[in-house]
Image: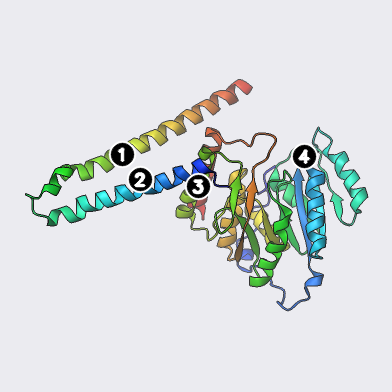
Amino acid sequence: ASPGASRGASAATAAAASPRPPQGRSSRRDKYSVLLPTYNERENLPLIVWLLVKSFSESSINYEIIIIDDGSPDGTREVAEQLEKIYGPDRILLRPREKKLGLGTAYIHGIKHATGNYVIIMDADLSHHPKFIPEFIRKQKEGNFDIVSGTRYKGNGGVYGWDLKRKIISRGANFITQILLRPGASDLTGSFRLYRKEVLQKLIEKCVSKGYVFQMEMIVRARQLNYTIGEVPISFVDRVYGESKLGGNEIVSFLKGLLTLFATT
Amino acid sequence: MATGTDQVVGFGLVAVSLIIFTYYTTWVILLPFIDSQHVIHKYFLPRAYAVLIPLATGLLLLLFVGLFITYVMLKSRRLTKKAQ
């Protein structure tokens, strides 16, 4: 199943963009839904949830955490069920799926159950720290942005735990992308972002690619649909356990996706 | 974040590119205006190379990228065939 199953949506609706709520609205009514797609994150899940709850309750933000587990064999789901009991089913929502179906569909699945008017997507493997979320929210309010994206390439942003080769490839890929697509955002492949719910919904409908290119396509399409993008510097910490893959195959499929986007936007 | 060696390599890359930039600029833009008997000409190759060297490097780079992509694609095709 591809995230672009309903790609046929007419381009005319795109021009309408998002109906922006009036700026002066009481911030207490805003609710933030965090989508956490997980696969074998048994150890990380309690930590990330605890950190999320901590940073939300410290800045008294209304929130919910939606855990979308893709049938992990390591029992992530049982851990999530216990967390649901601890923090309450209005805070932690468990919406598992039977098998691994991919990130795009996980987001679609999560949005269906999200009750907040903003959606935050992040990785559950602790590479994204929830302490940045209040900054995302502040940034969003400051400019009334449709999307706030975490960036590793600006201000205090950065990467921990990558070797030189990986850094150079990442920089190179980012450089080529900036030149070819002129996306108006400095970090395209990052996946720590805050969206207005309806914006995310519309973007996912439009996106067809997978893997690294998926996050990139979201930003590029957002630019195409005239959504506004704000940026917050984040520090990204590479997963301590488990290898994150970057080989020839990833590079070639990234280039392919890049050229497809270049040709179609 | 930026560990010691990474930072050294980064500054090294910046330094090398700055050196190349200034050397090439003098070679191509300043030298034509300097008297041909001047000693400075000893430090530069004939002007034809100012075009040939970058052209050759570009071609080599393109060739390398092409080879890399073909290699990766062939390998992944072989792997999928084996899987079937």
Chain of residue at mark 1: B
Badge 4 is on which residue? A41
Q: Is residue A146 above or below residue A24?
A: above
Chain of residue at mark 2: B
Q: What residue type is labelled 4?
A: Glu
Q: Is mark 4 on a helix, strand or loop?
A: loop
Is residue A116 in view from this perspective?
Answer: no
Give how far apart the Cα atoms at labels 3 and 1 are. 21 Å
Q: What element carries label 1?
A: helix
* In-image side of A214 versus A116 (left or right): left
Badge 1 is on which residue? B57
Q: What residue type is labelled 1?
A: Thr
- The lab-note entry on whether marks 3 and 2 share a chain reads no
Badge 2 is on which residue? B16
Q: Is mark 2 on a helix, strand or loop?
A: helix
In the rendered image, residue A249, in percent from the top left (x then y), is placed at 55, 34
Badge 3 is on which residue? A171
In the rendered image, residue A15, in percent from the top left (x then y), is placed at 60, 67
In the rendered image, residue A80, in percent from the top left (x then y), is placed at 86, 44
Q: What residue type is labelled 3?
A: Arg
Chain of residue at mark 4: A
Q: In which quarter of the image is residue A69?
A: top right
